[in-house]
Amino acid sequence: MDLRQAICTKFKRDNGLDYRPEQIVVSTGAKQSIINVVLCLVNPGEEVILPAPYWVSYAAMVELAEGKVVELPTSIDTNFKINAQQLADAITPRTKVLLFSSPCNPTGSVYSRDELKAIADVIAQHPNIYIISDEIYEYINYTGKHESIAQFESVKDRTITVNGLSKGYAMTGWRLGYLGAPIEIAKAADKMQGQYTSATCSITQRAAIAALLGDLQPTEQMRQAFLERRDIIVEAMRQIPGVQCNCPDGAFYVFPDMSAYIGKSDGTTIINDMDDLSMYLLDVAHVSTVSGSQFGDHRCIRISYAASEANIREACRRIAEALQRLQ
């Protein structure tokens, strides 16, 4: 109970959201919080809208629930964000959930209050659609203020806000995520997870109270370090011919468009897609990236800058050198 009360305090303090302890469910990570809700809400054949690129597990979660993934493609030109009209056009009588993250993994994109309001206005017109808002990167935000879509009264009673400790508190291995939801959704999620994990460990729960109610200064120092690293990697990637790289507003990833290298070869390896390019960079440059195809985008790769400045600079140097060999 005291942990759930601490989570309520955090939601009110940071997001302006009023939740009661019985509306809070604690899980073994935000990922489990999301799958709990997906399994509770999505019936076979129902549609879940995923703005693409999206975190790799989202589509698999929908498939586990026997739902249908509806991807909404975006591009670097829109900073990888959907707009309200795009969302409205995708809704059908089978639509059950809109699932998205802000800040986003893999793109680092952050939705503004006005952008979220426009999305909320669309969902408000469809009383059978729920929103799952993944806000795990809330504190790694370079725009000045995080915005939660649950702040809008028109959709609050159909919004599930998911968060956790792994990113903002650098507590990945502690495995604690949580959600705030309408009471009927919270009860269902609690019943669902009670059959396969019950709860995260008691030691982590005590640590979570200390994190949530403690001083955020260490988090702010981490955010500032990530901001400096972002600027380093964005500048370096933009200097590489053929690479298009926007400047993400959150998280610790860049998601450059590398499609200019499709069809090129170093004489041994032909780059047919981003899977090939990621393997090429691993084999030749010894730099690990992730193909955008894993996130629903076939033009880009994801690069994490959760690394030292020295390693970031060296990785970018190696990437540039390897790409120069492709003709």
Image: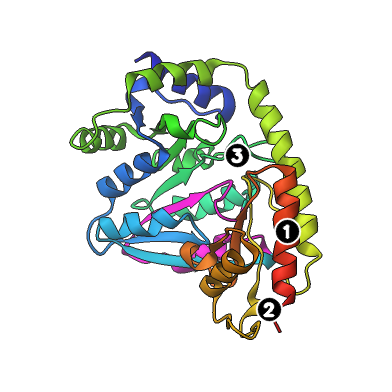
Whether residues under marks 1 and 3 lie with C-beta atoms below 8 angstroms apart, the answer is no
The picture places residue 34, in percent across and down from the top left corner, at 37, 44
Q: Residue at x 73, y 35 (%)?
A: 224
Asked where in the image residue 283 lies, by quadrant, the reply is bottom right
Q: CA distance from mark 2 to mark 1?
A: 17 Å
Marking on residue 147: 3
Q: Residue at x 64, y 86 (%)?
A: 267
Position of residue 195 relative to residue 325, above or below, is above
Question: Crowding near pointer 2: few (<14 within 10 Å), some, many (20+)?
Answer: few
Identify which amino acid the numbered label 2 is placed on: Ala
Question: Crowding near pointer 1: few (<14 within 10 Å), some, many (20+)?
Answer: many
Between 213 and 284, the one nearer to me in the picture:
284
Q: Give the quadrant of the C terminus.
A: bottom right
Q: CA distance from mark 1 to mark 3?
A: 32 Å
Is 281 situated left or right of 97 in this image? right
* Mark nearer the N terminus (2 vs 3): 3
Decide whether residue 16 is among the magenta residues.
no
* Residue at mark 1: 316
Q: CA distance from mark 2 to mark 3?
A: 35 Å
Is 1 situated left or right of 233 in this image? left
* Residue at mark 2: 260
Identify which amino acid the numbered label 1 is placed on: Cys
- Closest to the camera, between mark 2 and mark 3, is 2
Decide whether residue 90 is among the magenta residues.
yes
* Mark nearer the N terminus (2 vs 1): 2
